[in-house]
Image (tube, grey):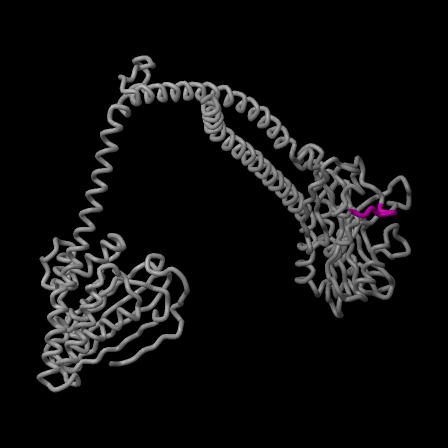
């Protein structure tokens, strides 16, 4: 008995522990995953926002080039005059006046925008001249400290690919190394008299871009940088001063540790592209800094889970011991009941379990006995009702009488080959099947044979012409059904559906579909009104003998008794169209082996 108590204690302890531990582990793990995902999404959204702001601020600086481009497109005549002036050996006073008017549109933004280092305008000319916002007149390539931009323009003009691009450049202002200047040059080629024969160059100070990156609201250890389309770093937000561009540093988004060093958990890299200006904006953040909060929360969750487990164990032990004690009380009280002594209460008055146990012991034997008697009576009643229904189809005395009548008819007719003896033989076949009380179920083929015998009798008896169409896809299978199921349904069709009607047809189907055996009898007779159909369906559920369709009612009740209350007859009818009676039985109740499908071959014949 101690082993039983010990096993009960362990099971009881488990039943208390598992409902606590499983949700705790699942919710804890799910919480950590959700928090980590949420923080990751929030961090990515924050980085995305920083990148978009950085891209917007930088592109806002470069929009000045679009303004200059629009002015140039609308002032093509002025550009043509500028070409002529640049080709002249010495500009005239009128040329200087026009030059001052033309320079006004590049000098104004260069003066008003502190981030603009200079603006150049070049129109193809024979003297290699251009105008600049840093000088008052024209300049020649041989006389300026910044002429490298022309090589980039010439290369792109010859390639004929991009009309707008950007590149980082450095030059010594005034030709002095102490005035080293780093810029990003944005180029915009124009078509004046030929293809790409003019260009506007906007030089943006690189240190100003560095300040823009420094002002961005970044998180700790987050790095911002701008590269060109070839991934060459233009400016980094984590450097004190913009670096020189010789040699240039390459940034690989798949290997950011080459630029920033190794990190414990790697880096989270997010990029945006500005194809219009040929720039990449990147954010690089160590994952250890990015997911610091989820890691800390996971640690706190683990500690909380451990404390919860210890508390759950303590509470589970308390309840398990109490339940074991109550079980011992129950066993002792049952033992007292078996010995015939009055069970003694072993719990206090406030113990609800003791009260419940005493009530159970007081009523246990009586209720158990009553349930057994009720179940036995119900089984006897169903058996008696089934036997009573069966007896309506099994009149023994008729078989003996029919045999005598058959031989008398043969003697009077001078032989067995006459309509009367044939009718008696067919009726005898039906009665033989009905009289076999031991065989309550028959094969499909035997049920068809009974029904055909009944149809032959009806043809000889009434002389009425009607067709019978058989669709028996369930033949040849190991299926056994209650005998004499079809005959009452066919009889109902003849008596109530086709009587006095020419061209009557009865269709009988037996087939399997979706794990169910389906039997149906259809006639194209007079049918029933909805009201009459409802009355008939109601009488099928009523006491035996209420309906005029006694064969149908009998069959319905036999099905209910044999297979359960869910199974019986289904009747569908429309006035003037006919009536369909259907039986649906699970194959598991009527079939032991074999298998058929709804698409299997079947025999269909007309009688």
Q: Is residue 25 left or right of residue 84?
A: left
Locate residue 441, reporting x and y percent.
Answer: 27, 61
**248 vs 321: above or below:** below
At 87% from the left and 63% from the top, the residue drawn is: 127
Depth order, front residue of 587/380: 380
Position above or below: 555 against 5: below
**Side (left or right) of 505 relative to 318:** left
Tell me if residue 37 is in the magenta stretch: no
Which quadrant of the view contains residue 122?
Answer: bottom right
**Residue found 22% across the figure and 46% down from its top:** 379
In the image, residue 327 lies at what x, y percent? 39, 22
In front of the other: 350 or 293: 350
**Which image quadrant: the N terminus?**
top left
Where does the magenta region start and end?
Answer: 245-251
Q: Residue 551, located in which quarter of the rendered image?
A: bottom left
Instruction: Give the quadrant of residue 477.
Output: bottom left
Quarter occupied by the C terminus: bottom left
Closest to the observer: 595 or 423? 423
Image coords of residue 455 (percent x, y)? 19, 76
Residue 373 position in % (x across, y down): 21, 38
Horizontal side of residue 5 vs 423, given as left or right: right
Q: Which one is nearer the viewer's eye here, 383 or 173?
A: 383
Q: In this image, 560 relative to 5: left or right?
A: left
Residue furthest out toward the top: 348
């Amino acid at each position: 008995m101690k082993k039983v108590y010990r096993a009960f204690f362990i099971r009881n302890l488990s039943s208390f522990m598992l409902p606590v531990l499983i949700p705790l582990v699942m919710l804890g793990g799910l919480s950590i995953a959700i928090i980590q995902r949420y923080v990751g999404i929030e961090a990515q959204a924050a980085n995305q926002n920083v990148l978009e702001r950085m891209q917007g601020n930088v592109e806002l600086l470069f929009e000045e080039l679009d303004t200059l481009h629009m002015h140039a497109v609308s002032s093509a005549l002025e550009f043509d005059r500028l070409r002529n002036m640049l080709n002249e050996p010495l500009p005239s006073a009128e040329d200087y006046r026009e030059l001052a008017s033309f320079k006004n549109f590049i000098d104004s933004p260069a003066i008003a925008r502190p981030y603009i280092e200079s603006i150049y305008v070049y129109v193809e000319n024979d003297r290699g001249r251009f105008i600049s916002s840093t000088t008052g007149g024209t300049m020649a390539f041989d006389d300026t400290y910044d002429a490298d931009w022309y090589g980039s323009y010439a290369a792109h003009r010859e390639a004929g690919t991009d009309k707008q691009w950007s590149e980082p450049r450095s030059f010594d202002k005034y030709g002095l190394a102490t005035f080293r200047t780093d810029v990003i040059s944005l180029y915009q080629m124009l078509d004046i008299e030929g293809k790409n024969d003019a260009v506007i160059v906007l030089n943006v100070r690189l240190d100003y871009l560095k300040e823009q990156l420094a002002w961005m609201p970044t998180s700790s250890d987050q790095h911002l940088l701008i590269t060109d389309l070839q991934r060459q770093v233009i400016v980094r937000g984590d450097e004190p001063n913009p670096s020189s561009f010789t040699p240039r540093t390459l940034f690989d988004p798949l290997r950011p540790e080459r630029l920033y060093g190794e990190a414990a958990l790697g880096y989270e890299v997010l990029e945006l592209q500005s194809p219009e200006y040929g720039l990449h904006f990147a954010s690089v953040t160590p994952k250890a800094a990015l997911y610091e909060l989820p890691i800390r929360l996971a640690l706190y969750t683990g500690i909380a889970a451990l404390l919860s487990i210890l508390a759950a164990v303590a509470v589970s032990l308390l309840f398990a011991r109490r339940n074991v004690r109550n079980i011992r009380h129950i066993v002792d009280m049952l033992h007292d009941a078996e010995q015939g002594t009055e069970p003694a209460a072993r719990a206090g008055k406030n113990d609800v379990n003791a009260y419940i146990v005493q009530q159970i012991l007081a009523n246990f034997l009586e209720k158990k006995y009553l349930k057994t008697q009720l179940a036995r009576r119900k089984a006897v009643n169903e058996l008696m009702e089934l036997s009573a229904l069966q007896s309506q189809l099994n009149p023994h005395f008729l078989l003996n009488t029919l045999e005598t009548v058959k031989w008398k008819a043969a003697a009077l007719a001078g032989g067995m080959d006459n309509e009367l003896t044939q009718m008696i033989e067919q009726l005898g076949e039906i009665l033989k099947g009905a009289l076999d009380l031991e065989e309550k179920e028959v094969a499909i083929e035997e049920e068809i044979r009974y029904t055909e015998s009944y149809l032959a009798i009806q043809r000889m008896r009434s002389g009425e012409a009607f067709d019978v169409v058989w669709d028996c896809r369930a033949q040849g299978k190991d299926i056994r059904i209650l005998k004499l199921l079809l005959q009452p349904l066919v009889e109902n069709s003849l008596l109530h559906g086709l009587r006095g009607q020419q061209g009557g047809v009865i269709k009988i189907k037996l087939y399997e579909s979706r794990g169910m055996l389906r039997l149906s009898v259809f006639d194209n007779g007079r049918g029933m009104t909805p009201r009459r159909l409802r009355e008939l369906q109601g009488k099928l559920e009523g006491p035996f003998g209420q309906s005029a369709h006694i064969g149908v009612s009998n069959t319905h009740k036999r099905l209910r008794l044999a297979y359960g209350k869910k199974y019986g007859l289904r009747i569908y009818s429309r006035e003037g169209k006919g009536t369909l009676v259907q039986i649906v039985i699970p194959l598991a109740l009527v079939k032991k082996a074999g298998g058929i499908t709804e698409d299997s071959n079947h025999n269909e014949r007309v009688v």
